[in-house]
Image: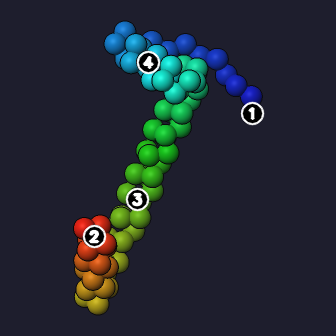
Amino acid sequence: MPEVKTTVSLPETLFHRAEAVAHELQISRSQLVTRALDEFIRRYESRVLIGAINRAYEDDPPTTEENELLLGIREKQRKLLES
């Protein structure tokens, strides 16, 4: 994939923290920034998608039966996490 060079200004403390993490991971600053941006964008896109799904469900709220099923699933998940 082609790469594009860019210049970014960072607060000095953030720069030094990034340097330390890149050194610890044995990767370049560019690789660290690439990974961080990729993760940030993935999380952002997930939040946008979840928001769209939630808005769609607002138009067609779950039935009583669906709510009971969801409560049962949540209870089972909670028990699994506790064990």
Q: Nearer the viewer, residue 6 or 33?
A: 33
The mark nearer the N terminus, 4 or 1, is 1
Residue 1: which disc?
1
* Nearest to viewer (mark 2 / mark 4): 2
Q: Quadrant of residue 73?
A: bottom left
Q: Secondary structure at mark 3?
A: helix
Residue count near mark 2 (Cα–Cα under 10 Å), binned few <14, some 14–19, many ≥20: few
Residue 16: which disc?
none
Q: Residue at x 43, y 44 (%)?
A: 44
**Callout 1 amino acid:** Met
The mark nearer the N terminus, 2 or 3, is 3
**Callout 3 amino acid:** Ile
Q: Position of residue 2 (x, y in %)?
A: 74, 28
Q: How many marks?
A: 4
**Callout 4 amino acid:** Ala
* Nearest to viewer (mark 1 / mark 2): 2
Q: Position of residue 3 (x, y in %)?
A: 70, 25
Q: Secondary structure at mark 2?
A: loop
Quarter the C terminus occupies: bottom left
Name the residue tied to disc 2.
83
Residue count near mark 4 (Cα–Cα under 10 Å), binned few <14, some 14–19, many ≥20: few
Name the residue tied to disc 3.
50
Name the residue tied to disc 4.
20
Q: Position of residue 61 (x, y in %)?
A: 30, 78
